[in-house]
Amino acid sequence: MKTKIIVIKVGGAVMSDPAGILFLYQYVKEMLFEAKCPVILIVSAMGKTTQSLNSILESGNVETEINSITEFTMNLASKILKPLHMSGGFDSFEKNFRGHMMEVSELAKKELTITTLSAVLSKGELIAQNFIGNLFTFRLWKENTGVSTKYLGLDRTIVLDTFTPYIVNFSDICINTEKTRVNFKSFSKVLNAQGMKPSLYIAPGFLGITVGGKISIMGKDSSDVSLAVTACELGASKAIFLKKTDFTSNVLPYSVFEKDAERAIEKGGSPLIHPIAIQLLRMDKIPTSIFNYLNKRTIEIVY
């Protein structure tokens, strides 16, 4: 039996400019009021932040890449958060963001290990979580919606047995199923205690926490897996991948739902999703769709 919970994963490309971020806000807000249930929003790093963070580690060009990330991120913040006329949201985000960048600068001086890699690359999702959290918190409050916005911490989500490299074989994502299940059962109790009323929880994709309590990435494009694990463990009634992609030009190293490829091309959308994510969603029969921001069309997935 499915629980009336919707899990949405938003890709970084959607959040690469003000129009995409404001569309995300409207899309999720409408979902909250139409479905009248909790929504879990899983965010990827905004734009090409992860690529820039990875370049810091690969090229060692720390100052240039940090300046690039700062210019991109603070430009979005000035256009999205400042117009809310709630200086607290902008100031809070800026302080959080600059703290993350200082940590990246210090980490870049250290020996490159899998721990350092995870610590640096995790900043993209954590920054996005704080940015989108501030946006929803202040706008939903300003619009007097009565809907609360909360952050879903890593201690409530996926537990990994070991650290995971950035480039990884799909089978090498070592999720500790037992401990992950305990985390989500605890979160389910919170939702049930609140009567499953409309509320928004924002979680970082791409990340898990090791059994030792350290943040670890889960490998390239693994925010899809974050959605799948969350939806399956909560028994969600709907999973939605919100992407901005052109099937003819965005070629990822895997293609899922090949039987739907022709239909996707006709619609201009892309059914490209991490194979582990689809494997999990298919096993648990979670109703799943892909919404393509590029053409504003939805592809319903038929298992």
Image (cartoon, rainbow, N blue to C red):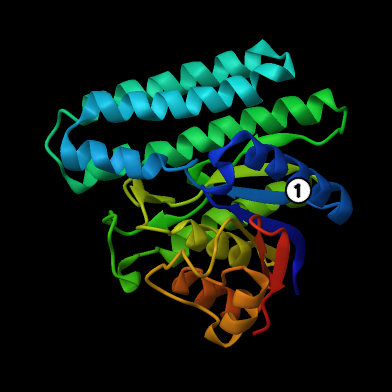
Q: Residue at x 48, y 56 (%)?
A: 223
The quarter holding residue 65 reads top left
Q: Quadrant of the C terminus?
A: bottom right
Secondary element under disc 1, as helix, strand or loop, is: helix
Q: Is residue 231 visible?
A: yes
Q: Position of residue 153 (x, y in %)?
A: 53, 41
Residue type highlighted by circle 1: Tyr
As drawn, 284 above or below 239 = below
As drawn, 189 above or below 65 = below
Q: Which residue is mark 1?
A: 27
Q: Position of residue 30 (x, y in %)?
A: 83, 47
Q: Is residue 195 visible?
A: no
Q: Residue at x 73, y 13 (%)?
A: 85
As drawn, 142 above or below 110 = above
As drawn, 61 above or below 152 = above
Q: Residue at x 69, y 44 (%)?
A: 24
